[in-house]
Amino acid sequence: MGNLINNPRLNELPDEEIIKQILTGDKKLFELLMRKYNSHLYKVGMSILNNATEVEDIMQTAYIKAFENLAKFENRSSFSTWLIKVLINEGLLQLKKRKRFIKIEDLKKMEVLIDPTESNKEPTPVGLLINKELGHALENALMQLPEKYRLVFVLREMEDMNIAETVEVLGISSVNVKVRLNRAKMMLRDTLCNYYDNDNIFYFHLSRCDRIVNNVLHRLGIFSEE
């Protein structure tokens, strides 16, 4: 798979061109789309399910459904918006299967969310502790939000979706998007004393990225060249 990942020419292709080449027979290029959007889908999935294993499952299902319906993608919206909508539908279906609401106790099952190796500075022991505690505090505060507020917050603030894209993905009015986002921020401020940071929430590990990509390619019968 390294040939695709490390090919600058391929990685610079816009989604539309990648999709075009996939539909004309170069199915291996679907790997590029998965690696590009894995982190985004993981954040959105976690905001719905708060369970890493379940999120990996719905991500794989969403990718497979997206691949199988790629010819139906009409570029009316961005591919990322279309893909996230597929993911959200899978997440909501999984919630129905659970027949229960997300509980804050599930936070104990989640991984460390901050990767200190991404910083240019060598982290100090105190800095690591502060970052870890901050990450848990932010995650805890976010997961206490009701799902409808949490999902809008993740899409608008973490995924940088505009109002129109959020409306399309969630099927609610622009007024509802604004109201839910403002309500989410107010609830977070109550918990975090006017501070929140979205960069370190639901950190997506590279090992998880590889696992999801490999599983999807295997299930689709697509194998990249070594």
Image (cartoon, rainbow, N blue to C red):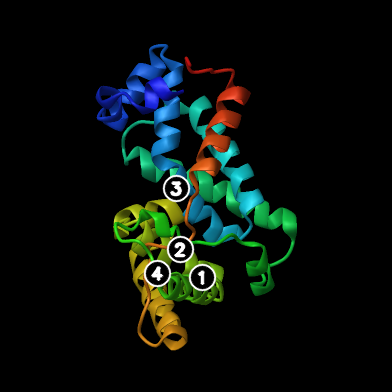
Q: Say left or right for 66 vs 221.
A: left
Quadrant of the rendered structure where residue 214 is? top right
Q: CA distance from mark 4 to mark 3?
A: 27 Å
Q: Which mark is residue 124?
A: 4
For marks 1 and 2 on the same chain, the one whose residue lies earlier in the sequence: 1
Q: Position of residue 115 (x, y in %)?
A: 44, 57
Q: Mark 3 sits on what residue? A: 39
Q: Which of labels 4 and 2 is toward the front?
A: 4
Q: CA distance from mark 1 to mark 2?
A: 6 Å
Which residue is located at x 69 percent, y 56 percent?
A: 96
Q: Which mark is residue 201?
A: 2
Q: Mark 1 sits on what residue? A: 139
Quadrant of the rendered structure where residue 123 is? bottom left
For marks 4 and 3 on the same chain, the one whose residue lies earlier in the sequence: 3
Residue 102 appears in view: no
For marks 1 and 4 on the same chain, the one whose residue lies earlier in the sequence: 4
Residue 25 appears in view: yes
Q: Position of residue 37 (x, y in %)?
A: 41, 41
Q: Secondary structure at mark 4?
A: loop
For marks 2 and 3 on the same chain, the one whose residue lies earlier in the sequence: 3
Q: Residues within 10 Å of mark 2 (few under 14, many from 20)?
A: many
Q: Residues within 10 Å of mark 4 (few under 14, many from 20)?
A: few
Disc 1 residue type (three-letter): Glu
Q: CA distance from mark 1 to mark 3?
A: 16 Å
Disc 4 residue type (three-letter): Thr
For marks 4 and 2 on the same chain, the one whose residue lies earlier in the sequence: 4
Q: Which of labels 1 and 4 is toward the front?
A: 4
Q: Say left or right for 225 vs 19.
A: right
Q: Position of residue 198 (x, y in %)?
A: 38, 65
Give above or below for 29 relative to 122: above
Q: Position of residue 25 (x, y in %)?
A: 42, 11
